[in-house]
Amino acid sequence: MNASLLESIRTRFSVRKFDGRCVDREILQICLEAARLAPSAENSQPWRFLILDDPETIRSFGRSAFSGIYSLTGWAASAPVLIVLLAEPDLIAGRIGKWIQRLPFYLLDMGIAGTHLVLQAQSLGLGTCWIGWFDLRKTRKFFGLPKGIKVCGMIALGYPQPGQPVRKRSRKPLEELCRFNSWK
Ligand SMILES: Cc1cc2nc3c(=O)[nH]c(=O)nc-3n(C[C@H](O)[C@H](O)[C@H](O)COP(=O)(O)O)c2cc1C
């Protein structure tokens, strides 16, 4: 029987060390398909995925995006795959959401799509780590991204190096996070 979704969520952890194996494009395709099917505000599907699976491109990009104060993220240049999460917010869900509702919906949409991708990857035996600490300006420059495209983060992906200690981060208890029917 398949592990329950909650069990998968419980056992997921951020993987920053990968074994040497490449990830087949067919496998990547399944993870990207899971992201593609995510819900989004007004079904605007703002996500765009820039997939790096060429080691030399990853290394060269890493030298640029993970330099200086971002060198803490240098480990990511050794990942077999880096997925740069891009968004092209549309007029209604993107701009109106921001102006009227004061909520950049596209960021919510990107988080949901990324989560689909991460959980699908896990179910295929892959490890992932979200990356928010990188040089945004150099990333834009490296890929020559046009103005309308936002860079929302990255996901490193690959087969986890065996034997690494699982450093599970603690989580706040539910009682601290939830209130029913009123926020008083
Ligand atoms: C939006 C976001 C950005 C993150 N950025 C980074 C990062 O730049 N570098 C890093 O090593 N981990 C990063 N992480 C991973 C978190 O540190 C990690 O998810 C958190 O500590 C909980 O640990 P766990 O994923 O092992 O449960 C990021 C996670 C999220 C969701």
Image (cartoon, rainbow, N blue to C red):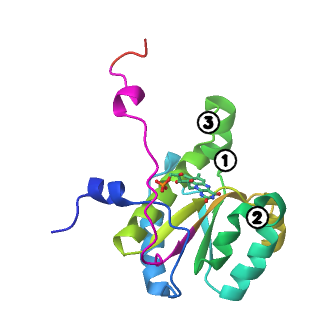
**What residue would you read off at disc 3?**
103
Amino acid type assigned to the residue bearing label 2 in the image: Ser
Q: Is residue 75 magenta?
A: no
Identify residue type, mark 3: Leu
**Residue farthest left in this picture:** 1
Instruction: Kindly state the secondary structure of the residue where label 2 is placed.
Output: helix
Question: Splitting the image into 4 quarters, where does residue 144 fall?
Answer: bottom right
Identify the residue shown where x is 58% and y is 43%.
105
Q: Could you tell me the amino acid type at mark 1?
A: Leu
Q: Position of residue 81 (x, y in %)?
A: 58, 78
Tell me the mark number nearer the camera, choosing from 1 and 2.
Answer: 2
Picture disc at residue 91? 1
Q: Check the image and report above or below for 113 versus 56.
A: above
| Residues drawn in magenta | 156-180
What element does badge 1 sit on? helix
Q: Determine the quadrant in which ligand 1 lies.
A: bottom right
* x and y, in percent, of residue 108 in the image: 55, 46
Q: Is residue 165 magenta?
A: yes
Name the image quarter holding the C terminus: top left
Quadrant of res 69: bottom right
Taking depth in this image into account, of 18 and 9 the one nearest to the observer is 18
Q: CA distance from mark 1 to mark 2?
A: 36 Å
Which residue corresponds to mark 2? 71
